[in-house]
Image (cartoon, rainbow, N blue to C red):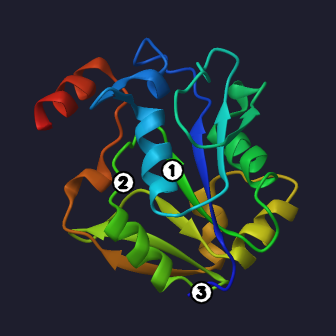
């Protein structure tokens, strides 16, 4: 287990061009949006602080009783890696960090706790369903600190190749889902 506390980085700065609307504000169910559901799931599991990287169009008027630190990505054209870099700059020193895409809104408190228990400072943890990794990824405190020092993070997957990967089995196929298009969102609604 990592010695530090665990922060959460929610990536929500994409332009959502294929979806045609802001994915953070998509209805998740129970009167919550994707962003609200993720924030409440992580805060309810005791993870803090919660940092959300957004763009100029993201609706940040979230009616959640949790403090969220919003980081504005003014260069969404530079891609997801720039959002990761901006977000990591706001993680307190020594904290481990979940990295969660807003378009992968499924979180399971039991799985999050299992991932946290499997973590060591120089490792990262990935949930796995049927041999394939999914979301979220949990970075150990040392990994966060080292990535934060890099001038750029070209691709998170490539950047993590120099660290030890720990896999935590999951019985939930939804860890593989990314909701990027209206058709994928309709499928999500049908899954309930």
Tell me which numbered mark, 3 or 1, is placed earlier along the sequence: 1
Identity of the residue drawn at 50% across and 44% down: 39
Q: In this view, does 172 lie to the left or right of 176?
A: left
Identity of the residue drawn at 66% across and 77% down: 162
Which residue has dot 3 on it? Answer: 120
Q: 150 or 173, which is in the foreground?
A: 173
The picture places residue 181, in percent across and down from the top left corner, at: 33, 23
> Which residue extends farthest left?
190
Tell me which numbered mark, 1 or 2, is placed earlier along the sequence: 1
Q: In this view, does 156 lie to the left or right of 21?
A: right
Query: Residue 107 shows which numbered tag?
Result: 2
Query: Residue 100 shows which numbered tag?
Result: 1
Tell me which numbered mark, 2 or 3, is placed earlier along the sequence: 2
- Marks 1/2: CA–CA distance: 9 Å
Counting other residues with Cα less than 10 Å from the Cα at mark 3, is it few (<14), some (14-19), or many (20 or more)?
many
The picture places residue 91, in percent across and down from the top left corner, at: 76, 58
């Amino acid at each position: 287990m990592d010695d530090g506390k665990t922060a959460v980085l929610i990536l929500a700065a994409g332009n959502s061009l294929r979806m045609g609307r802001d994915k953070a504000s998509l209805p998740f169910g129970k009167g919550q949006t994707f962003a609200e559901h993720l924030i409440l799931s992580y805060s309810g599991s005791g993870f803090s602080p919660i940092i959300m990287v957004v763009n100029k169009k993201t609706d940040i008027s979230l009616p959640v009783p949790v403090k969220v630190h919003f980081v504005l990505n003014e260069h969404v054209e530079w891609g997801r890696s720039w959002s990761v870099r901006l977000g990591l700059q706001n993680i307190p020193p020594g904290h481990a960090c979940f990295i969660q895409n807003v378009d992968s809104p499924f979180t399971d408190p039991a799985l999050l706790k299992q991932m946290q228990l499997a973590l060591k400072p120089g490792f990262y943890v990935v949930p796995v369903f049927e041999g394939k990794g999914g979301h979220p990824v949990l970075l150990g405190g040392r990994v966060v600190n080292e990535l934060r020092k890099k001038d750029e993070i070209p691709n998170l997957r490539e950047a993590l190749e120099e660290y030890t990967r720990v896999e935590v089995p999951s019985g939930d196929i939804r860890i593989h889902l990314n909701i990027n298009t209206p058709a994928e969102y309709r499928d999500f609604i049908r899954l309930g």
